[in-house]
Amino acid sequence: APDEQRYWAGRQQGLVQYCTLPSAISEGRAGRAYQGVCPPQIDGAFRDLHQAAYAVHEAQQRQRELQSTISSRERELRKDGLSDRERDRLRSEIRDLDRRRENQRDEVYRRERELDRTRRRYGV
């Protein structure tokens, strides 16, 4: 039978290790969701830092996805047997994706700056 008292003691010990401001940043940057488990005295700061770090993760993920799509379209463009019309369509799509990737790069930069401001606000 599970030992409920040991379980709760272990959980409490784990929360002490988890519920730190540096952990909020690393968890958010890793793309892991926050489940609202930290005590009230740290929850607000943890949420703010986690949210800012998670936003960086999401922006970087969108940038990686765009790069992957560009690479895929470039591979398609190198295939033999494509019509001129198909090549033009792929080139146009690559240019559009490249512009979106540049915009996303700017978004990553904005999110990083916001994370830095949030870190400074909490002295992390």
Image: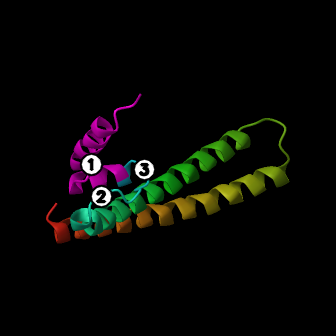
Q: Nearer the viewer, mark 1 or mark 3?
A: 1
Image point (25%, 41%), residue name = 9
Front one among 26 and 110: 26
Q: Nearer the viewer, mark 2 or mark 3?
A: 2
Q: Position of residue 90 (x, y in %)?
A: 73, 53
**Mark 1 Cα-neighbour bin, 10 Å: few <14, some 14–19, many ≥20:** some
Residue under pointer 1: 15
Image point (76%, 56%), residue name = 88
| Residue 116 showing in the rendered view | no
Three-letter code, disc 2: Cys
Which is more N-terminal, label 3 or label 1?
1
| Disc 1 from disc 2: Cα separation | 7 Å
Marker disc for residue 32? 3
* Residue interval drawn in magenta: 1-27
**Mark 3 Cα-neighbour bin, 10 Å: few <14, some 14–19, many ≥20:** few
Which is more N-terminal, label 3 or label 2?
3
Front one among 45 and 26: 45
